[in-house]
């Protein structure tokens, strides 16, 4: 460890208590999907609802998950109606299928979209009502049906996270359900399932993983996290365990994301990105995400761009806005991505970090301007206002933001 790093680590705050939650168990490795029968049996499962989509069925991935379940004598029903950035109506359909089938385990198979559908389905099947009833942080009243999540993208970290995100087409935005009860009992991460991801899905989801790790690393300090008394949140600001996983995730993205996008069959890169995504999920789902994610809600809602593309576009602009409040941590990002920052001051290294993230985004083909997504300038004020309403994530941001600040970030990104 260099002197600079020692200084950085000596700033770890021990003034507060913090917690770290993740999936109950993580099973990681090539061909891990073959163990799904044992996984579901160990949870006492006899009837498993697999939540997936038609693209994954056509790619043969649904069959790869179903075969070991059937071999273990489990009754399997597949809901293949999942859609990217799932609208709440699709979630209600999945719940209706679940009410009919009466599973004892719900298995999310896919990217974040299908895993999030599985999470809300397991919630509504356990507690009744409608999907919207659980919107917010800490609304889910108790344990949900046992959940197994099997990611087929390397990005969201939903397999270990406490979140489920749904689109609300009526309001042209998204809403999140946040609860530690939504953490899967088991995350089965098989990097081979990501090999068939097209380059765009690899790029978008990969830069989402980077966004999770950067927003967690540069979040407000846990000691200063402004949680009103009596209020609970799964997010708590940055803390040593969050830093550990976020830093490793950033390093892995720096080494492997370009390679995974350039050659989907580069298995070492797929392994690295699968781990990066899961570690990024562990980081953000305890520490929090911040302004990038708040702004992505209305942008995704209006343009239907993927979550990852919206986040990747915004990330360098938000880092630039935030850096004065977290200079040393922003400086760390570039070094972790592999930039040579030896001899640079924190100010110089932070600027190099922002440039490195923008270059990575451009190299993998994620758009760099809101106009490229079809946003018009007149939409920006309403987007800023919508994002300003997402207080539970804005309070994670290292720098306090006004609605005008959000608008100026959007203008810079326009
Ligand atoms: N719950 C969380 O913690 C969390 C975190 C971040 C993002 N999200 C949500 O996750 C969603 C985005 O998820 P995503 O980026 O993983 O993409 P996705 O799940 O939306 O999938 C994108 C597309 O890629 C296809 N696909 C997925 N895996 C494939 C594979 N192996 N081979 C071929 N095609 C494949 C899917 O069928 C889909 O059409 C958004 O709704 C976002 O809001 C949730
Ligand atoms: Zn995200």
Image (cartoon, grey):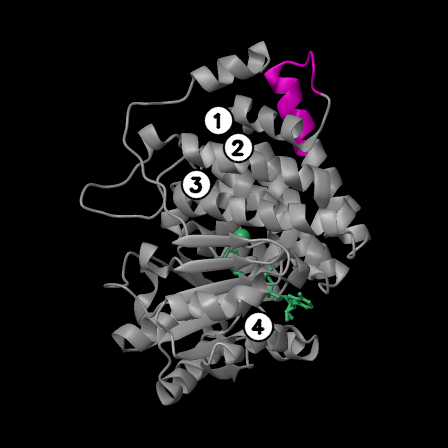
Q: Which of marks 4 and 1 is nearer the N terminus?
A: 4
Which residue is drawn at the image coordinates 70% and 15% (left, top)?
Answer: 342
Assess whether mark 1 and mark 2 are in contact (beta carbons under 8 angstroms): yes
Q: Nearer the viewer, mark 3 or mark 4?
A: 4
Determine whether the beta carbon of the residue marked 1 sits less than 8 angstroms from the nearest atom of ligand 2.
no
Tell me the magenta residue range: 341-354
Label 4 CB, ligand 1: below 8 Å? Answer: no
Left or right: where does residue 264 sit relative to residue 125?
Answer: right
Residue 218 can be seen in this image? no
| Left or right, 64 with reference to 368 | left
Residue 61 belongs to the span the image colors magenta: no
Ligand 2 under 8 Å from disc 2 Cβ: no
Q: Name the residue under label 2.
A: 322
Determine contact: label 3, label 1, CB under 8 Å.
no
Pick whichever of labels 3 and 1 is earlier in the sequence.
1
Q: Where is residue 167 in the image (x, y as percent from the top left)?
A: 49, 68
Q: Mark 3 sits on what residue?
A: 402
Tell me the SS state at disc 4. Answer: helix
| Numbered circle sitting on residue 325 | 1
Task: Determine the residue located farthest toward the right in the rendered image.
Answer: 262
User: Image quadrant of residue 258?
Assistant: top right
Q: Residue furthest bottom?
A: 100
Query: How many residues crowd mark 4 within 10 Å: few (<14), some (14–19), many (20+)?
Result: many
Is 343 part of what is drawn in magenta? Answer: yes
Q: Earlier in the sequence, mark 2 or mark 4?
A: 4
Distance from label 4 to label 1 (Cα)? 45 Å
The nearer-to-camera label among 4 and 1 is 4
Mark 4, residue position: 65
Q: Position of residue 397 (x, y in %)?
A: 44, 38
Kindly state the secondary structure of the residue where label 3 is placed: loop
* SS for dot 1: helix
């Amino acid at each position: 460890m260099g002197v600079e790093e020692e200084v950085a680590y000596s700033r770890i705050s021990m003034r507060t208590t913090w917690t770290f939650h993740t999936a109950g168990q993580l099973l990681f490795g090539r061909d891990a999907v073959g163990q799904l029968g044992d996984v579901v049996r160990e949870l006492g499962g006899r009837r498993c609802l697999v939540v997936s989509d038609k693209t994954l069925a056509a790619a043969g991935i649904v069959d790869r998950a179903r075969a070991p379940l059937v071999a273990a004598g489990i009754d399997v029903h597949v809901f293949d109606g999942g859609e990217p950035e799932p609208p709440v109506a699709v979630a209600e359909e999945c719940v209706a299928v679940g009410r009919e089938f009466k599973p004892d385990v719900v298995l999310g198979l896919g990217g974040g979209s299908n895993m999030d559908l599985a999470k809300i389905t397991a919630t509504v099947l356990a507690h009744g009502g409608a999907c919207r009833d659980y919107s917010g942080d800490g609304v889910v009243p108790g344990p949900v049906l046992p959940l197994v999540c099997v990611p087929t993208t390397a990005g969201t970290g939903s397999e270990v996270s406490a979140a489920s995100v749904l689109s609300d087409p009526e309001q042209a935005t998204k809403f999140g359900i946040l609860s530690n009860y939504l953490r899967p009992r088991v995350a089965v991460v098989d990097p081979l399932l990501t090999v068939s991801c097209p380059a765009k899905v690899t790029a978008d989801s990969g830069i989402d993983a980077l966004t999770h790790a950067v927003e967690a690393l540069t979040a407000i300090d846990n000691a200063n996290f402004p949680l009103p008394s009596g209020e609970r949140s799964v997010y708590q600001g940055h803390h040593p365990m969050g830093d550990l996983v976020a830093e490793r995730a950033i390093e892995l993205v720096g080494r492997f994301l370009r390679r995974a996008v350039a050659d989907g069959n580069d298995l070492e890169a797929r392994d690295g990105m699968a781990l990066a995504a899961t570690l990024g999920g562990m980081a953000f789902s305890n520490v929090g995400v911040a302004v990038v994610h708040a702004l992505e809600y209305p942008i995704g809602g209006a343009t239907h761009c993927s979550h990852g593309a919206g986040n990747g576009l915004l990330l360098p602009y938000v880092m630039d806005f935030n850096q004065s409040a977290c200079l040393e941590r922003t400086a760390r990002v570039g070094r972790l991505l592999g930039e040579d920052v030896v001899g640079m001051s924190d100010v110089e290294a932070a600027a190099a970090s922002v440039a490195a993230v923008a270059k990575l985004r451009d190299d993998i083909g994620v758009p760099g301007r809101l106009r490229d997504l079809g946003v018009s300038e007149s939409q920006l004020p309403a987007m800023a206002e919508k994002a300003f309403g997402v207080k539970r994530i804005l309070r994670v941001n290292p720098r306090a933001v006004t609605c005008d600040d959000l608008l100026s970030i959007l203008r810079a990104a326009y």
